[in-house]
Image: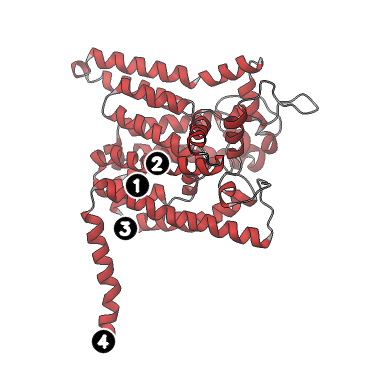
Amino acid sequence: MTSGGVAQRPRALLLRLSALFSSLPPWGQVLLIWAASRVLTTALLGAVFAVATRAGWTFASYRTDPSFFTFSGSWDSSFYRQIALQGYPAELPTDAAGNIEPNAWAFLPFFPWLTRGIVAVTGLDFYVAGVLVATLFGALAALMLHRLLAPRVGASSALWAVALFCFGPLSFILQVAYAESLYLFLIFASLGLMMARRYLLMIPFAVLAAFTRPGVLALSLALAIMLVVRWREGSRFAWRERWAVVVAGLTIAAVGLAWPLVAGAVTGVHDAYLQTELSWWTGFVGRVEFVPLTPWFLMAGKYLGLAGILLILILADGFGWWLSRRSLHPLRPEIVAYSASYGLYLVAVFLPQQSLLRLLMPLAPLLGDPAIARSKTLRRTLLGAGIVLQPAAIVLLWFIGYP
């Protein structure tokens, strides 16, 4: 056989695999991408766990019974386990000075309660059940992301968005015992219903999201923007739809603000939730008072001075420029309105640190930007960077910081 014939074998195999992939229904293509990404991510997590165990590395989140599943249940998962098995503390933990310390009130109940139900039915360990729940909803989030993007940007752009989502630098979060994948599924479902103008049907998904992770207020703000945008349609914006937008927006805003009230009522400390959240800031900026729209500037100014303040302004301007680009027209107005609202939410309340990339994941619909799918160089660079950065992120967040 000639060397040319041997060289043609890989190409022929790739062509057959491509043809097989193209013959699958859209949901099958999405699930195949998801499965391939989980094989890679599980292999990376397993390899890092095995190397760390053999080398005797000190795990950032200590476990008395180290296993792959407890490794996949580090940090926040321990709080979710506490909530599932013991509930929330009626008395807040404090230090010698009386300052509230990190505790379970920073974490919302839907994911741990759902996982506890799986534990009760199956008898599985919490960390095993948490990984299974997260992985299942990760697949559902990928399917929902494709479903909300495909009608607007086409099959190719939607599939590339799914691939970048599944293989992103922090995509391992979608299969560890965290609430992220459940939250993303609920948010993507809410966005899909917003795009279909079925506003009242958004409410149950948004309510569950509000008790899964913080951030649902961005949906309420996006609905307010949609009310203004659609009001300009005049008679095409029926009064029934106008009332539906208002009811959905107000309901979602109410549930988005409910958890601090619950924490205050149970503990007897009116700002229990806020002080609990601020307790995580002390290692970065010390004890501070919360002022909306200042955390990013506080963090940047502390470590980078004036240059940090300018950097935040440049990043905000760059994000605004991206949202205003012509190529994002298919994602207007709903996804752009939500993305702008969520970006404002992060700047308003979040202190940027190593969890930032994880908290940017609800912006995944922007990966449907047709400009990404049109550029072979850009999409391959983004995909390759996501894969290469995964092991670095695992080591950083499991042995140095926390995700």
Q: Considering only order in the chain, which callout, 4 or 1, is on the residue closer to the N terminus? A: 4
Looking at the picture, which amino acid does disc 3 mark? Lys
- Disc number at residue 251? none
Q: Secondary structure at mark 1?
A: helix
Looking at the picture, which amino acid does disc 1 mark? Ala
Work out whether residue 212 or residue 314 is closer to the camera in this orientation and state it. 212
Location of residue 109 with respect to 371 vertically, above or below: above
Front: mark 1 or 4: 4
User: Where residue 147 sits in the image (x, y, percent)?
Assistant: 29, 39
Location of residue 119 with respect to 96 vertically, above or below: below
Mark 2 to mark 3 CA distance (whole Å): 19 Å
For residue 58, side relative to residue 18 (left or right)? right
Query: Which residue is rendered at x = 66% and y = 46% of the image?
Result: 63
Which residue is identified by label 2? Answer: 364
Which residue is identified by label 3? Answer: 376
Looking at the picture, which amino acid does disc 4 mark? Thr
Mark 1 to mark 2 CA distance (whole Å): 7 Å
Residues at circles 1 and 2 in contact by the CB criterion of under 8 Å:
yes
Mark 1 to mark 4 CA distance (whole Å): 40 Å
Which residue is identified by label 4? Answer: 2
Query: Which residue is rendered at x = 26% and y = 50% of the image?
Result: 156
- Residue 372 visible in the snapshot: no
Q: Considering only order in the chain, which callout, 1 or 3, is on the residue closer to the N terminus? A: 1
